[in-house]
Image: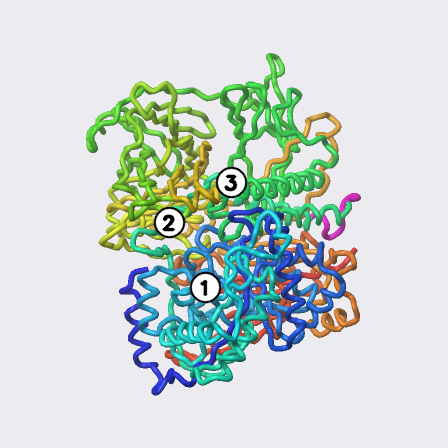
């Protein structure tokens, strides 16, 4: 975000500055003990548990119990849950409950991890919060009220909205652009009320505290030293232990702490100073930490230093700050991305680092989403056949844990060591195998599961996890060229088969209602058995020889059209590149070409700048990464595929990268609208040469004024004006694209939809470039010693969908198409036998259908066994009923989201009312609807978030969790961008 964006807020601060504020003798210091415990990064979770993480909780609990004035905040739930379930004694568990009741131990954020904010999808942010909050509430009856997002590399505007919906009263961030932070410090602008959503604005705003330049660490006060791996030293002597406090050095320590406090105090508008005490991997020996700090705090309070100091939780600090009733400025929906820590250190490389992990994480999330709703539909109104629900929940919970874990800010970011990446991949794959096994057991009904080509044919079950009817093409690998595809009624299904190296790809057109499935018979046919109406059509291939790279502007005299009902893509025979696209809706031809390019980067850490897992620092502008391109056009009745193969040198035997573009031949009306209006592109890139960063650049004649729009976590869009920085301009104009980005002019909009996170930028008018892959190796000794290099030798296959058309029409398709890409139908294959095919389907209920502007964000059986009534739940905990009983299978979690911003679309942006009894009729009779907070732990009728006075005079900010009142019955209204969460109770059979 540019500094100019903050000028209106600076003006507010001048007007709001209270007279006589910040007298030196009135400073109240809140010393907040904490340990930053990365769920991954350099060491695996198990390695961290052995070396220090378990000792943090063991020793902190012991030391808090010793003295009443001590405090501690716990953040990442994954380590705590592992300690609680596998290490903590009954005595320690009792102490934890006592400390929580006395507010001396406090959980902040409360999710499984401290999630990244740039490259995570908001669905997965909600999941990891829900996982952690559900455990804390079920186990202790507590609900976190404050965030502690102190280490993610930039701050998204979607996160404060989600935290507000979860019931949080205040939000803490730290890593924002160094230039901006310096300005905010000097203007005492580090605290404000943030309205993260332009549509929800005041309803879901949250008070936000930006940490100053010292961030969350307190160098000089680490008496326990540095954690030792693989195990703690037997003599208890750790490296880098600060000198213990003695009578001879206590004054020096006091002056150091007080001096730091007074420096910080001038950057804030009130006399209350938040002083975080801790850093990465601290408090594994809490005894020595507290013993020294006890002496220091007493000494400061008993001498005339002009400050008072006290141990505090984050809640202690914010309660004291809130009680001052200060009037705060308001910040709108703009985010704090990208993040630069210094002049040549733009943290924009991690938007793409470890592309394969980013894709796997999102695929796992999508599979979990489908598995959750399929299991819920199986269980309600009653299971159709025997199934062990405990086993089923175990499979779902394993994948919930794995998807939550990888959202860590050194996980999905690709900034971890290779062994940690392997840990994430292992956990994700194991979780996915379990959920696929569960789904197969639900719909294949005992039919043997098959994953590869099967000579005798396949039984294919295709499940649509979205709550709309979806028409799309699914692809199956088969071992035969002549194939018949029929549905359950024996009717032929449109299909197309094409040869690959050792097998065949079968493309099948399917139309499936919401949360429903279709069964297909896929059989080989031979000779007389062939029925032309049932046999999948073959394709024809047009081949175009290699063409050398030519100067820009050459070509265009020999064009080859590839068309469907929505687009005609023109390909230039002179260059084998895309030339232009004609789109039907506005009858406009947009000139458009695509090519692979690369940035070559500095890897010498002795220079002012270099690229690594985190940073992107190109030496110069991107250059083409190819010298020749070959093209094939695979023509079929169902779809046509354009294959462009790019060669690094004109005589290279093998291509180094490729684009596969696909157009479906379906009508553009009704259910085929989304399929017709997209150009699907799959890319093959890699292995890269060392210290190269690969991009796909799309250049058009759209007069975009070099303005790019990219999303915050798949939830909302941000306008990105190209900023003319004096240094590092290319990297600082890169932004995260989690799900979508677009450019536009006054007539048309070009939208790029992605199934995973990438870096995206507009380096020229009418251009949009996506960074696809990175391979780096620097001589930075810190990175080398911690194995944090990015020698990624993989070949990747990311997918983008392109939408082009008049912006009002494309705006209506944008959100639904993004979800159609993220949540494509799940194909489950079984061995085709006469018994299996003739057996009735295991279950097929009435479809679950929502209006097109609403999305079913989750339908699941969480398994929590706490009472929805808070007072009753606390009573049960006091009686000793602490979650040891069986999972509750009767409570269904439903979350709905309005997809559109206010005024984004004249029809789809209107409030929508749905009747949940009608929508969920296929699951049974709804007997009760309870509206809950985002993660399910609050009854919204009892949730009253804090009100913060603001300059624009609103009096009830944050008091309501939703612009819509809780339902008095089954009718629920959602306003633009609202997310509403419910517990649904059905009548038992």
Q: Please give the residue where the numbered disc 3 appears in the rendered image.
A: 418
Q: Quadrant of residue 192?
A: bottom left
Residue drawn at x 72%, y 65% as measured from the top left: 93
Instruction: Give the quarter of the figure containing the N terminus.
Output: bottom left
Q: Secondary structure at mark 3?
A: helix
Closer to the observer: label 3 or label 2?
Answer: 3
Q: Earlier in the sequence, mark 1 or mark 2?
A: 1
Question: In screen coordinates, is 576 left or right of 665?
Answer: left
Residue neighbourhood size for the residue with mark 1, other residues' Cα within 10 Å, grouped as few (<14), some (14–19), many (≥20): few
Q: How many marks?
A: 3
Residue bearing the label numbered 1: 219
* Segment colored magenta: 378-387
Indicate left or right for 496 with 941 as reference.
left
Tell whether position 382 is magenta: yes
What residue sits right under mark 2 in the picture?
348
x and y percent of residue 945 in the render? 54, 74
Q: Earlier in the sequence, mark 3 or mark 2?
A: 2
- Contact between marks 1 and 2 (CB within 8 A): the answer is no
Reply above or below: 560 against 182: above
749 to 537, vertically: above or below: below
Q: Which residue is the extreme one toward the top? A: 527
Q: Residue furthest front?
A: 248
Coordinates of residue 236 in the picture (x, y in percent)? 61, 57
Label 2 CA crowd tier, 10 Å (few <14, some 14–19, many 20+): many
- Rate crowding at label 3 as few (under 14), some (14 to 19) or many (20 or more) other CA atoms within 10 Å: many
Residue 467 visible in the current orientation: no
Query: Which mark is drawn over residue 16?
Result: none
Label 1 to label 3: alpha-carbon separation: 29 Å
**Dividing the picture into quarters, in which one does residue 596 lie?**
top left
Can residue 173 be seen in this snapshot? yes
């Amino acid at each position: 975000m540019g500094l100019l964006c903050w000028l209106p807020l600076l003006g507010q601060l001048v007007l709001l500055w209270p007279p006589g504020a910040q007298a030196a003798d009135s400073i109240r210091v809140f010393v907040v003990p904490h340990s930053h415990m990365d769920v991954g990064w350099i060491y695996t979770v198990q390695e961290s548990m052995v070396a220090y993480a378990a000792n943090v909780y063991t020793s902190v609990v012991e030391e808090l119990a010793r003295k009443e004035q001590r405090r501690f905040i716990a953040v990442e739930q994954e380590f705590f849950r592992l300690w609680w379930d596998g290490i903590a004694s009954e005595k320690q568990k009792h102490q934890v409950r006592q400390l929580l009741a006395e507010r001396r131990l406090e959980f902040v954020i409360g999710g499984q991890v401290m999630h990244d904010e740039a490259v995570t999808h908001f669905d997965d942010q909600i999941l990891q919060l829900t996982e952690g909050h559900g455990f804390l509430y079920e186990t202790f009856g507590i609900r976190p009220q404050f965030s502690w997002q102190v280490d993610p590399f930039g701050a998204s505007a979607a996160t404060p909205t989600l935290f507000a919906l979860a019931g949080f009263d205040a939000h803490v961030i730290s890593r924002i652009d160094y230039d901006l932070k310096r300005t905010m410090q000097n203007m005492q602008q580090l605290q404000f009320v943030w309205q993260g959503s332009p549509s929800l604005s005041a309803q879901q705003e949250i008070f936000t505290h930006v940490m100053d330049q010292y961030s969350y660490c307190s160098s000089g006060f680490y008496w326990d030293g540095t954690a030792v791996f693989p195990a703690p030293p037997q003599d208890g002597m750790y490296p880098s232990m600060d000198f213990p406090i003695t009578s001879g050095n206590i004054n020096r320590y006091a002056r150091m702490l007080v001096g730091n406090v007074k420096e910080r105090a001038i950057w804030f508008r009130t006399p209350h100073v938040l002083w975080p005490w801790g850093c990465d991997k601290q408090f594994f020996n809490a005894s020595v930490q507290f013993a020294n700090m006890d002496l220091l705090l007493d000494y400061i309070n008993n001498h005339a230093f002009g400050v008072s100091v006290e141990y505090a939780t984050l809640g202690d600090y914010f309660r004291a700050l809130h009680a001052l009733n200060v009037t705060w400025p308001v910040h709108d929906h703009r985010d704090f991305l990208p993040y630069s820590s210094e002049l040549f250190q733009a943290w924009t490389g991690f938007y793409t680092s470890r592309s394969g992990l980013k894709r796997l994480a999102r695929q796992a999330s999508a599979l979990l989403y489908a598995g959750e709703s399929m299991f819920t539909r199986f269980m309600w109104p009653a299971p159709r056949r025997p199934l062990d629900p405990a086993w089923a929940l175990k499979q779902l919970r394993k994948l919930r844990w794995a998807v939550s874990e990888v959202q860590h800010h050194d996980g999905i970011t690709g900034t971890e060591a290779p062994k940690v990446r392997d840990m994430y991949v292992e956990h994700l794959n194991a979780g996915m195998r379990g959920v696929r096994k569960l789904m197969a057991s639900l719909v294949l009904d005992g039919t043997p599961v098959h994953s590869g080509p099967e000579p005798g044919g396949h039984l294919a079950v295709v499940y649509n996890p979205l709550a709309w009817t979806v028409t799309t093409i699914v692809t199956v690998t088969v071992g035969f060229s002549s194939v018949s595809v029929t549905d359950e009624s024996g009717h032929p299904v449109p299909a197309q088969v094409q040869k690959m190296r050792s097998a065949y790809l079968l493309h099948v057109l399917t139309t499936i209602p919401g949360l429903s499935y279709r069964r297909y018979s896929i059989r080989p046919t031979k000779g007389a058995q062939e029925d032309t109406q049932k046999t999948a059509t073959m394709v024809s291939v047009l081949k175009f020889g290699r063409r050398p790279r030519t100067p820009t502007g050459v070509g265009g005299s020999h064009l080859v059209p590839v068309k469907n009902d929505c687009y005609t893509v023109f390909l230039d025979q002179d260059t084998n590149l895309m030339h232009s696209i004609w789109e039907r809706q506005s009858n406009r031809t947009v000139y458009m070409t695509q090519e692979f390019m690369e940035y070559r980067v500095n890897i010498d850490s002795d220079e002012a700048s270099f690229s690594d897992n985190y940073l992107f620092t190109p030496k110069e502008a991107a250059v083409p990464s190819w010298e020749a391109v070959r093209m094939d056009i695979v023509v079929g009745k169902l779809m046509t595929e354009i294959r462009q193969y790019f060669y690094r040198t004109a005589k290279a035997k093998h291509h180094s990268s490729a684009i596969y573009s696909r157009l479906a031949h379906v009508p553009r009306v009704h259910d085929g609208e989304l399929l017709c209006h997209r150009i699907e592109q799959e890319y093959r890139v890699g292995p890269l040469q060392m210290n190269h960063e690969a991009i796909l650049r799309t250049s058009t004649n759209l007069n975009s004024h070099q303005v790019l729009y990219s999303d915050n976590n798949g939830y909302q869009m941000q306008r990105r004006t190209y900023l003319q920085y004096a240094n590092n301009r290319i990297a600082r104009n890169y932004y995260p694209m989690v799900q979508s980005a677009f450019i536009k002019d006054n007539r048309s909009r070009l939208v790029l939809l992605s199934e995973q996170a990438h870096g995206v930028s507009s380096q020229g008018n009418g251009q949009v470039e996506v960074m696809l892959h990175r391979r780096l190796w620097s001589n930075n000794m810190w990175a080398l010693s911690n194995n944090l290099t990015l020698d990624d030798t993989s070949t990747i296959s990311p997918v983008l969908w392109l939408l082009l058309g008049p912006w009002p029409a494309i705006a209506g398709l944008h959100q639904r198409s993004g979800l159609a890409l993220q949540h494509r139908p799940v194909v489950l294959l079984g061995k085709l036998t006469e018994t299996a095919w003739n057996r009735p389907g295991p279950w097929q209920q009435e479809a679950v259908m929502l209006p097109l502007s609403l999305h079913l964000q989750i339908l699941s059986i969480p398994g929590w066994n706490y009472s929805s009534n808070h007072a009753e739940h606390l009573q049960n905990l006091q009686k000793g009923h602490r979650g040891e009983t069986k999972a509750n299978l009767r409570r269904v979690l439903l979350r709905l989201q309005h997809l559109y911003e206010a005024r984004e679309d004249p029809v789809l942006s209107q409030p929508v009312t749905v009747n949940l009894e009608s929508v969920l009729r296929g699951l049974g009779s709804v007997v009760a609807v309870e509206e809950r907070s985002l993660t399910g732990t609050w009854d919204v009728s009892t949730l009253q978030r804090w009100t913060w006075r603001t300059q624009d005079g609103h009096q009830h900010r944050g008091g309501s969790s939703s612009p819509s009142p809780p339902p008095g019955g089954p009718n629920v209204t959602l306003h633009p961008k609202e997310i509403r969460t419910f517990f649904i109770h059905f009548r038992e059979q």
